[in-house]
Amino acid sequence: MMRALDELLKERDLDEINVAAITAEAGVSRSAFYFYFEDKAACAAALGSDVYQEVLTATHALITSGGPPRERISRTIQAVLTSWENHRHLFQGMLVARQRSETVRRLWDEYRESFIGPLAEMIDAERAAGTASAGPDSRALVTVLLELNDRSLEQLSTGGPLSADQRAEALTTIWLRTIYGTDPASASASASASASESESEPEPEPDDVTRP
């Protein structure tokens, strides 16, 4: 049934699909459908579990992988947007389902909540190490950043004015500057360049004649 809905969503919006269409596509009875799902919105939400796992993997990489902050954040944002690209029809279906069903909204919120704790712990650790800048409560910060990601995916799904690449660059910069205050790699490079310039400046020549 989930596979049937997935195929139907590639051709039309969730609002245009009814349970009869899903059961016909799946070759099952209506009673079999309602044995597993409360309604078509719940079925769409169950489909979203694959997307959730992909985003969860990308987020885990942000927290555990090495490399400069910009590189890690960029990889994660790109992975999220790639997941959206691969499942665009499903994202659109889930957006409609979230508007229609309290059950789906609650599940969506639970998905997002599962990312908040680990990301907040990462920020707290970076702050303690002196890498990230001081700021508001880390959980509140992560919540707002994740809501920003959600909104960007909504805009992409409904045909917003910006491309996925434009949003990826903007989101990466916002996450980076919000957490770290600046780009640590750029700041380090600027400091090194300034130090090199200072070292390369010639010492002033002493006066040929020492005046009394």
Image: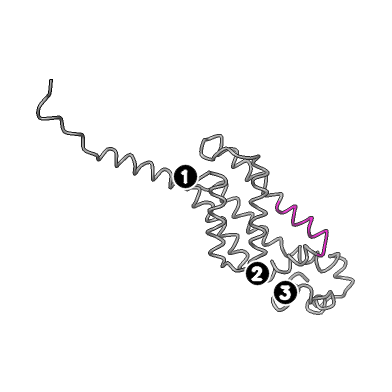
Q: In this picture, is 80 found above or below 14?
A: above
Identified at 72% across, 72% down, the residue is 6
Q: Where is residue 154 in the image (x, y as percent from the top left)?
A: 67, 64
**Quadrant in the picture for the C terminus:** top left
- Camera-near label (1 vs 2) is 1
SS at badge 3:
helix
Which label sits in the foreground, 1 or 3?
1
Q: In this view, does 198 lie to the left or right of 6?
A: left
Which kind of residue does numbered mark 1 sit on? Pro
| Residue at 57 percent of width and 37 percent of height | 134
Query: What mark, if any, has residue 88 been given in the picture?
Result: 2
Look at the image and say whether residue 108 sits in the magenta stretch.
yes
Which percent across, then down, holds residue 34?
87, 68
Q: Is mark 2 on a helix, strand or loop?
A: helix
The Cα–Cα distance between marks 1 and 2, rounded to whole angstroms, is: 34 Å
Residue that label 3 marks: 9
Q: Distance between the residues labelled 1 and 3?
A: 43 Å
191 falls in the magenta region? no
Give the extent of the magenta segment. Answer: 100-112
Using the image as rendered, state which of residue 14 and residue 40 is in the foreground. Answer: 14
Q: Earlier in the sequence, mark 1 or mark 2?
A: 2
Residue at the spot 15% in from the left edge and 30% down from the top edge: 206
Q: Nearer the viewer, residue 160 or 47?
A: 160
Residue located farthest toward the right when viewing the structure as drawn? 31
Q: Determine the main secondary structure of the stretch shown in magenta.
A: helix
Residue placed under numbered mark 1 in the picture: 184
